[in-house]
Amino acid sequence: MTTVFLVPRRKDNGHRDRVWDYCRARWEALFPAIPIYEGHHEDGPFNRSAAVNRAADNAGQWDLGIVIDSDVMLSRSQVQAAIDKSAETGRVTWAHRRWRGVTEDWTRRILDDQRDFGPEPSRDEVDLIVDRTNPLSWSCCFVIPRLVWDDMGGFDERFRGWGFEDMAFQSIVAGLYGHERIEGDVVHLWHPRSEERITPGQPRYTATPEYITNARLGRRYMVALRRDFAKHDRGDMPASEEERQRDIRNLKFDDAKFAGVVRRLGLPNWDDWWPRLEELRDGAKAARGKPTSPTVTVAVTSGGPADVWDARREYLAQSLASLTERVTGNIVQRIVFSDWPDAITRELSHVVEQYGFYVVGGGHHGYSEMRHRFFRYLNRKALGEYVFAAEDDFLYERDVDLAPMLDTLRDNPDLRQLALLRGPAFPREFEAGGVLPSLKTPTELVNHRAYPFVRHRDHFTCNPSLFRKSLTETAWPTVESSERAFGDRLLRDPQAAFAYWGQGEPWIKHLGEVRASPTGAY
């Protein structure tokens, strides 16, 4: 089993380099058979995530990676125990619990004297040289199996400058993979404080754009861990429901403090973006250039008058559960666009949040006006390059992988929409033997890169479908039969076409008899 050290670095031709020279010599003496690979990030604010990823790439083929900061010391037995535990369990294993900071004076003495602490520094020795102790650390030194590293895609390189990439990593590991911990201390040698994170003497919200973005992105990882997995970062004991809700409230409250400066600096507006850990992981992979699949916003419309809410609420819950289980891909945002009266919004939010969605829109406007507002919202606020749009009363009967659908749309620029086919629902469709035989225009089965689809120029559908975000630049008409009118508007382009995914088999099933309006427009 090949084991390697992975070290994120930036040269300073000064004190930090001296610290690393000392620590590296100690690691080489304690573990002479384990090679050390450095990953450097030299341009712009230091990106520790990118540096760790580069070290992992530089190491080539390995089975266990020991990620260490360039300014820490641990006992040999702790690190060996972490290696053994990670090899045994296949889980990320931290080699320490407490973080202990060495004073500036003692750090300089250690470097000047090249002091030898031996493989197992004593508690008395450590107590003498430290002035700060953190009872729990999620950084500094841990062992990660290659299978976990490859599945999660390494560290999230969207964290630029100092901070929060370690809490994002902890959230992903704790929520999706599980971890182990070895008891003991990690000793951190002093170095000058990085000032790229905040302006000295100023509050947090006056920090650099990189720090603000890091802080907001990190909180989304931390909220997702608590919301979806009922876990936290304070240790191994499970949190009570009261603690979990308190954490989420506090994290969101702190996040809201940045809202004003975010707008002033033109930073990404993430006020309503609280994704699942899987989406954050996949977004981080995309940021590293893999997978190459573009990003997707999943947007579900839901609405109607108040008197049908009780029945439609059940349809919505079933539909979101089915969508969450069956529809996969590089999803970076999940929204439910509401056309319900405002009095229903709180209950609607409670229904959708358990599936990782959040509510936008609101107020009951009717179908055509709702679709107009929906498209306008997507054009301005969708985070994905593509949109998977759906209605709130469909079950997904097959697994839907968005990646090949995205490939199909990218390779076929004439396609304005790639929809999922449902079974017949109207008399004309039953008489014809299905949706496709009922169309008034010809259909063509196209086999593209082993991804078949049925091309046509008949209609645009509001049933679940994938399309480019740029489609929302075409305003939705506020007229009767607006779905037909919108499709006809797109078909003014003689090259435009629509398609159903697959070879003509149904992918979705329509739910229920209670319609959202007397005309069945929803």
Image: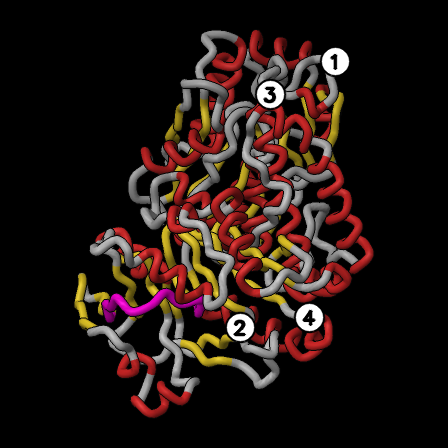
The residue sitting at the front extreme is 479
Badges 4 and 1: C-beta atoms under 8 Å apart? no
- Tell me how far mark 3 sits from mark 4, CA to CA: 46 Å
Residue 58, above or below 448: above
- Tell me how far mark 2 sits from mark 1, CA to CA: 58 Å
Front disc: 3 or 4 = 4
Q: Which residues are magenta?
A: 454-464
Q: Quadrant of the C terminus?
A: bottom right
Decide: few, some or many residues near mark 1? Use Cα within 10 Å; few <14, some 14-19, many ≥20: few
Residue 454, above or below 357: below
Q: Is residue 86 visible?
A: no
502 or 105, which is in the foreground?
502
- Tell me how far mark 2 sits from mark 3, CA to CA: 49 Å
Going from the N terminus, do you reach mark 2 or mark 3 first? 3
Q: Amino acid at mark 2?
A: Ala
Residue 201, numbered circle: 1
What residue sits right under mark 3 in the picture? 208
Residue 269, above or below 246: above
Q: Position of residue 102 (x, y in %)?
A: 68, 20
